[in-house]
């Protein structure tokens, strides 16, 4: 192997740059050059890349987002498009590909390997923590910490005014960000898609706290909750308790920003391991985290199985400690 390609795909996540840096520096250390495809599979299909040498990845480990861009590329669902792209990649002298993204991106990577014989390795990069085979995805830790910072700030106003706050965090299908943010942020309650009885319990719990004179009430709501996100939950609870409330939707604020130490380290390890796997002839693997260690997981398993739902013990803990 003389030349590797790398792309970042799907939603951006903090830590993607740390992964790019690790891939490039590990490859260069082994005498291999790296092409950085622009904007995910879109650049791969169009044969658009920039040369990633040692200097190109300097001063990026601390930056959120991805220096090579990312996108969603519906054309890549077409096998003919994939075959043409793989041929183009070979014509450009690229022998293997590291894909940084979520499970959709890994489906694309696996299809490239299975249909076109392209050696591929995956590195997680998504804040949602919804990829099978890894305890956490790169970007999740930073996203939770960002949400936490917002909650700490909102709490000042809640404490000063006595108003309830419903803070919506990302997570269309998974309450992982919400549960972690709620426990770490000392929230009064949390509403996630995985649980169904929470609103009634929440109303009684808040009623009890208000009666006891508690002033700050923060409720974390996952955007994908069936009750209609923070606006829906706020309206129901506010009406039931006849208590003033405000809604804060964090939205894309959670995607960007400086990656935490944990995301930088996990991304650095994963990027290096992805290159090692490809050089050792092990294609079709994703570097995941299991039990505090970085491990290779077959992509076939990653794309065919569902990430287990987040630990609902965190829901019970959030309730128990809410005061
Ligand atoms: P994520 O990787 O974060 O899950 P998406 O699901 O949007 O994000 O996938 C990112 C891109 O991966 C898609 O825009 C498409 O180019 C590619 N992709 C997703 N699913 C497939 C698939 N089944 N086959 C081939 N490519 C896919």
Image (spheres, rainbow, N blue to C red):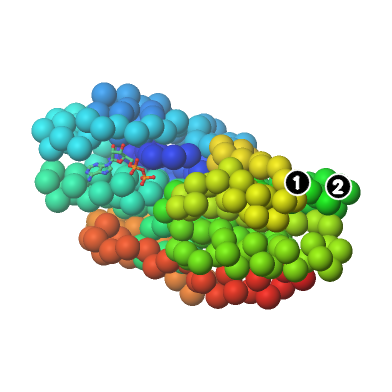
Along the horizontal axis of the image, is 163 left or right of 102?
right
Q: Nearer the viewer, residue 314 or 260?
A: 314
Give me the disc on residue 244.
1
Along the horizontal axis of the image, is 188 left or right of 55?
right
Q: Are marks 2 and 1 in contact (CB under 8 Å)?
A: yes
Q: Residue 97: tell me if it is visible.
A: yes
Q: Quick one: quadrant of the C terminus?
A: bottom right
Disc 2, SS: helix
Along the horizontal axis of the image, is 281 left or right of 54?
left
Q: Nearer the viewer, mark 2 or mark 1?
A: 1
- Find residue 42 and report its horizontal and vertical position in percent: 31, 29
- Assess disc 1: are there few (<14), some (14-19) or many (≥20) residues with their C-alpha within 10 Å of its C-alpha: some
- Find residue 19 and report its horizontal and vertical position in percent: 48, 47
**Position of 181 relative to 259 (above/below):** below
Disc 1, SS: loop
The residue at the point 67 percent across, 50 percent down is 238
Which image quadrant is residue 47 in?
top left
Indicate which disc, 2 or 1, sits on the residue closer to the N terminus: 2
- Assess disc 2: are there few (<14), some (14-19) or many (≥20) residues with their C-alpha within 10 Å of its C-alpha: few
The residue at the point 45 percent across, 71 percent down is 290
Give me the disc on residue 267.
none
Q: Residue 273: tell me if it is visible.
A: no
Give me the disc on residue 161.
2
**Position of 29 relative to 134 (above/below):** above
Which image quadrant is residue 237 in?
bottom right
Gap between marks 2 and 1 measured at Cα: 10 Å
């Amino acid at each position: 192997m003389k030349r590797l390609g790398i792309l970042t795909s799907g939603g951006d996540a903090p830590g993607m740059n740390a992964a790019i840096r690790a891939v490039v520096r590990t490859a260069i250390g082994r005498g291999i050059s790296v092409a950085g495809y622009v904007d995910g599979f879109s650049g791969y299909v169009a044969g658009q890349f920039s040369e990633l040498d040692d200097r190109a990845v300097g001063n990026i480990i601390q930056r959120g987002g991805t220096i090579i861009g990312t996108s969603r590329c519906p054309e890549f669902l077409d096998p003919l498009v994939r075959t043409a792209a793989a041929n183009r990649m070979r014509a450009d002298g690229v022998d293997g590909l590291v894909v940084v993204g979520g499970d959709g991106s890994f489906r694309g990577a696996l299809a490239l390997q299975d249909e076109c014989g392209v050696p591929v390795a995956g590195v997680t990069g998504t804040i949602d923590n919804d990829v099978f085979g890894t305890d956490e995805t790169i970007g999740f830790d930073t996203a939770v910490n960002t949400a936490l910072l917002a909650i700490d700030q909102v709490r000042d106003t809640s404490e000063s005014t006595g108003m309830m706050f419903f803070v919506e965090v990302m997570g269309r299908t998974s309450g992982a960000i919400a549960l972690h943010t709620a426990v770490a942020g000392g929230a009064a309650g949390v509403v996630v898609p995985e649980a169904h009885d929470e609103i009634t319990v929440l109303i009684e719990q808040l009623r009890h706290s208000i009666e006891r004179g508690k002033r700050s009430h923060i409720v974390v709501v996952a955007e994908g909750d069936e009750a209609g996100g923070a606006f829906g939950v706020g309206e129901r609870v506010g009406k039931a308790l006849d208590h003033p409330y405000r809604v804060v939707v964090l939205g894309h604020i959670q995607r960007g920003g400086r990656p935490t130490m944990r995301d930088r380290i996990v991304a650095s390890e994963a990027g290096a391991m992805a290159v090692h796997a490809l050089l050792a002839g092990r294609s079709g693997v994703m570097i995941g985290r299991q039990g505090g260690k970085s491990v290779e997981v077959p992509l076939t398993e990653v794309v065919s199985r569902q990430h287990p739902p987040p630990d609902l013990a965190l829901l019970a803990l959030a309730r128990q400690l809410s005061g």
